[in-house]
């Protein structure tokens, strides 16, 4: 796999390139047994380049057949190949390098570079896949204009696509044909794309704000032609939205989206030739869930938005990845908010941050949004870079307001159009547009870890003042033992008996108060700080971190009745949701404490009559019956915190016991199910959708609340299972069908479960994407013996150990969602995952490394941690680890 010990790359070692490639001319000869790639690179010394510096080209697994400069073939003594780099000494200051290599796309299982997916030739070059195609300075600060010639069999590959415009087509001898593409925009190699094969097209048109007609083409397998409408509609709405919200217009005459089955991530923003995982393009009511529809919309938008935030303005080096990803995730989140419900989107994103990104920040791979070193860059396409990066961009928006933020983004795009830049350049644009000084704020780029803000309050009854005292602290992360205080914009309000109180700020730090005086953003920038409010004549309940205004943990000793009040009455949607989560967590803690006490007692003492907390029952009833609120938000508020979130919280507070978490959560579920049983039944009936399926916010919200209600109801009543079976049978959409199936797998008999699973398989045997859900629900199921079930499914004819979507559904579903099976005390769950990773280490290192995530958390588990660690030790000792797996395994074991 590799020649030597993997090397660490450091940001501080960045040097601009000595040579620029002004023009890149590629010729592909595609055959079934091999592909020949001929490259002609027109280069010149860069402004900062050192005269006589060696020319450095990257390449990996290339069979070099020919290498020449200015038409003269190079003797072997003139160049050296080492560590995936080819160095040529004594090159002229400008000239043309020509190379010819032979590659084998059909044997490329890594899904990086040029590979085949169900016969289709396609590419994935980000981050460093282009070097698996040809010798090239494969770094994003080398931007070049491409001309691409593709020759292939006309029969097997009627479609020949690359970036930019089609400039020439011709028939060739031997049943072959040719297409030539030119992309006028200089681009880094990671944005190169080629697709060749048999595909069917859906076409549409978009007229841009300046009147340019753009042809929109989605290319899929013929059987999927009826599943493209939602992606096309999402694309058109994205194009319109980017013009209106960001003033960004599309810049070519054609935009392609190609769907491929085997893809390591969601999608890729290659200039005018986006390549997508089928799971992020195709949508039909029968085969796609509501969440699936929302994901298609978000990913289509995300990749489209990259045309400006990523392609027109790109990254200087991979340490700056969040420059394009954080910004683009912010942009797609704003798009989704404008298309649907802002409060709901915020709650969902805060949930992802707190469950998954906080866990990453607390684990061995913790890194700042701009990492300062890496071994394998693919390991840094993380929740931190993407989601926390987007939260950092959102904080500028909160600090500056929409209008000035927009001025900053306009300035950034204008100033850096056509350049490869850094996060510092983004900050400078925001500073120059606003006149603000972001030097303190910039610590968010270099400091890893989740800041914790502890809040104490004090109400002075006679002076009518109310004070909030903040202490901030960020725990150490690998390589960063001590942390500095950050600038945290804390949006807040004060809840009184009759609603939110007007805010009159007295002494304290800097703050911005809204026009209606009901909300303030406090600028917290010191280790400890105090803000005082005047004219407060009743004791208020603080409503903190409104809208999740910063990616931090916040700690305040609320009483349960305060939480219940916030959950049912606060003005902010995020705070209402969060208050209910805190209330649920507090009750779950109590349940776990009681269970632990019971352990030491005799049976008769044990039926300790635990009663459901009145505050929780009351708040649940209020929210459930508050018909003025959006059903989608009500569903999120009434949903129990996930086991993953509870695990993250518990480990933060000293250690997680997965079985105790699961048992207490199940107990609370049953208690809420019986206590509100009539409510669940009514909600279920009230939120049925009778209209034809549509993925509208309204319908999605109704289904979400109905299905949550049915799940609760079934936890207390056997009839629930019958209702679920009936819903399964009459469902006209995958959300309802799958929700019903999950209930039956959880609460029904083995026979009922087997019946529906067979039915599902027969219905969707030929629909790969729907079938992924079939694998996943079985992987998640805790009943029976999940380990043998997963092992048997890995042998199922419909399973495909080379397809990332299948691996994520079955193995990922098991390791991340089936806590009972994965954390089996004898370690069988860990060994199952380890065996899959071992096999994937060679086949597909990116996926192998991603699957490792649950094992990297071994330190979260005081009891099982050592057993998890044993599996990591075993992997660490394997003879030929890929760089990807090597980095994650070794960092997890270190320290
Ligand atoms: N730039 C892509 C995105 O965010 C990410 C991506 C797609 C990727 N495929 C990849 C990253 C493969 C690493 C490897 O949309
Ligand atoms: Zn992206």
Image (spheres, grey):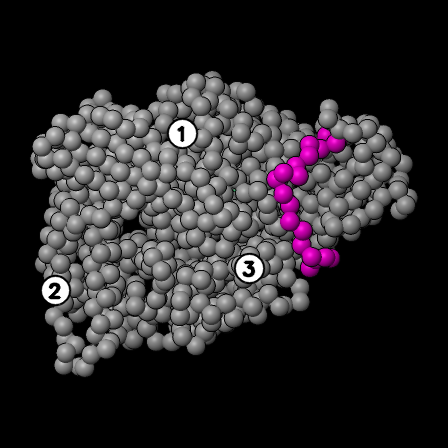
Q: Position of residue 527 (x, y in %)?
A: 37, 38
**Marks 1 and 2, how far apart in space?**
46 Å
Numbered circle sitting on residue 396? 1
Which sits in the foreground, 629 or 174? 629
Mark 3, secondary structure of its residue:
loop
Which residue is depicted at the point 12% across and 38% down?
539
Which residue is depicted at the point 50% across and 24% down?
428
| Mark 2, other Cα within 10 Å: few <14 / some 14–19 / many ≥20 | few
| Mark 1, other Cα within 10 Å: few <14 / some 14–19 / many ≥20 | many
Query: Can I make out residue 605 in this image?
Result: yes
Dot 3 or dot 2: first in sequence order is 2
Let me know if residue 17 is in the magenta part: yes
Residue under numbered circle 2: 611
* Tags 1 and 2 touching, CB below 8 Å: no
* Tags 3 and 2 touching, CB below 8 Å: no
| Mark 3, other Cα within 10 Å: few <14 / some 14–19 / many ≥20 | few
Q: Which residues are magenta?
A: 1-20
Q: Horizontal placement of 629 versus 17: left or right? A: left
Height in image: 819 above or below 380?
A: below
């Amino acid at each position: 796999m590799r020649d030597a010990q993997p090397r660490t790359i450091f940001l501080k070692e960045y040097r601009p390139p000595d040579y620029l490639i002004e023009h890149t001319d590629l010729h592909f000869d595609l055959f079934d047994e091999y592909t020949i790639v001929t490259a002609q690179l027109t280069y010149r010394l860069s402004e900062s380049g050192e005269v006589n510096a060696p020319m450095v080209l990257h390449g990996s697994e290339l069979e070099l057949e020919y290498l020449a400069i200015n038409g003269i073939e190079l003797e072997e003594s003139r160049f050296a190949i080492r560590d995936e780099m080819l160095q040529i000494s004594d090159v002229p200051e400008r000239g043309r390098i020509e190379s010819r290599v032979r590659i084998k796309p059909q044997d490329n299982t890594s899904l990086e570079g040029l590979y085949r997916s169900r016969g289709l030739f396609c590419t994935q070059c980000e981050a460093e896949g282009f070097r698996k195609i040809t010798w090239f300075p494969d770094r994003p600060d080398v931007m070049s204009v491409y001309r691409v010639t593709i020759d292939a069999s006309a029969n097997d590959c009627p479609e020949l696509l690359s970036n930019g415009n089609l400039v020439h087509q011709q028939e060739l001898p031997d049943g072959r044909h040719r297409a030539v593409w030119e992309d006028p925009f200089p681009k880094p190699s990671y944005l190169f794309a080629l697709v060749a094969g048999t595909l069917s097209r859906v076409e549409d048109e978009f007229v841009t704000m300046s009147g340019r007609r753009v042809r929109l083409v989605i290319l899929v397998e013929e059987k999927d032609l009826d599943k493209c409408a939602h992606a096309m509609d999402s694309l058109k709405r994205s194009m319109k939205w980017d013009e209106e919200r960001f003033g960004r217009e599309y810049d070519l005459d054609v935009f392609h989206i190609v769907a491929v089955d085997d893809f390591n991530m969601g999608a890729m923003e290659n200039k005018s030739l986006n390549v997508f995982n089928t799971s992020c393009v195709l949508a039909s009511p029968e085969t796609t869930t509501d969440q699936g529809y929302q994901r298609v919309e978000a990913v289509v938008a995300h990749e489209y938005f990259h045309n400006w935030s990523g392609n027109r303005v790109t990254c200087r080096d991979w340490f700056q990845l969040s420059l394009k990803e954080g910004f683009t995730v912010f942009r797609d989140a704003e798009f989704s908010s404008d298309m649907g419900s802002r409060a709901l989107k915020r709650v969902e994103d805060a949930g992802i941050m707190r469950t998954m990104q906080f866990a990453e920040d607390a684990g061995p791979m913790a890194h700042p949004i701009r990492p300062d070193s890496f071994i394998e860059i693919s390991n840094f396409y993380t929740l931190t870079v993407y989601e926390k990066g987007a939260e950092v961009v959102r904080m500028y928006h909160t600090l500056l307001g929409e209008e000035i933020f927009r001025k900053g983004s306009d300035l950034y795009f204008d100033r850096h159009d056509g350049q490869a830049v850094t996060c510092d350049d983004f900050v400078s644009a925001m500073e120059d547009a606003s006149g603000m000084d972001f030097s303190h704020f910039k610590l968010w780029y270099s400091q890893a870890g989740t800041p914790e803000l502890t809040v104490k309050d004090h109400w002075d009854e006679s002076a009518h003042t109310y004070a909030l005292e903040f202490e901030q602290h960020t725990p150490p992360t690998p390589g960063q033992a001590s942390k500095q205080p950050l600038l945290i914009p804390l949006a807040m309000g004060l809840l009184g008996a009759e609603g939110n109180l007007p805010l009159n700020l007295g002494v304290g730090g800097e703050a911005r108060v809204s026009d209606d005086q009901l909300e303030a953003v406090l600028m917290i920038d010191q280790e400890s700080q105090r803000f005082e409010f005047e004219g407060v004549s009743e004791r208020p309940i603080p409503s903190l971190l409104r809208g999740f205004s910063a990616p931090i943990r916040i700690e305040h000793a609320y009483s349960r009745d305060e939480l219940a009040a916030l959950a049912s009455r606060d003005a902010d949607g995020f705070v209402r949701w969060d208050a209910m989560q805190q209330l649920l967590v507090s009750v779950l803690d109590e349940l776990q404490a009681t269970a632990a006490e019971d352990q030491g007692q005799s049976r008769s003492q044990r039926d300790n009559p635990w009663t459901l907390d009145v505050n929780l029952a009351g708040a649940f009833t209020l929210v459930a019956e508050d018909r003025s609120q959006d059903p989608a938000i009500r569903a999120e508020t009434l949903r129990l915190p996930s086991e993953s979130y509870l695990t993250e919280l518990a480990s933060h507070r000293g250690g997680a016991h997965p079985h105790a978490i699961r048992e207490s959560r199940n107990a609370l579920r049953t208690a809420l199910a019986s206590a509100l049983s009539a409510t669940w039944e009514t909600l279920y009936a009230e939120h049925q959708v009778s209209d034809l399926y549509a993925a509208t916010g309204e319908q999605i919200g109704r289904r979400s609340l109905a299905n949550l209600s049915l799940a609760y109801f079934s936890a207390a009543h056997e009839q629930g299972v019958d209702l679920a079976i009936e819903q399964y049978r009459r469902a006209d959409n995958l959300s309802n069908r799958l929700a019903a199936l999950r209930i039956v797998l959880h609460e029904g008999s083995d026979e009922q479960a087997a019946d529906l699973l067979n039915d599902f398989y027969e219905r969707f045997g030929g629909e790969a994407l729907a079938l992924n859900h079939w694998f996943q629900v079985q992987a998640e199921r805790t009943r029976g013996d999940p380990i043998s079930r997963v092992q048997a499914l890995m042998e199922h004819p419909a399973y495909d150990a080379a397809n990332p979507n299948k691996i994520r559904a079955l193995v990922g579903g098991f390791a991340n969602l089936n806590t009972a099976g994965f954390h089996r005390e004898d370690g069988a769950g860990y060994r199952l995952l380890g065996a899959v990773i071992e096999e994937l280490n060679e086949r597909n290192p990116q996926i192998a490394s991603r699957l490792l995530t649950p094992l990297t958390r071994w330190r979260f588990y005081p009891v099982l941690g050592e057993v998890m660690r044993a599996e990591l030790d075993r992997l660490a000792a394997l003879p030929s680890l890929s760089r990807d797996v090597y980095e994650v395994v070794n960092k997890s074991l270190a320290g």
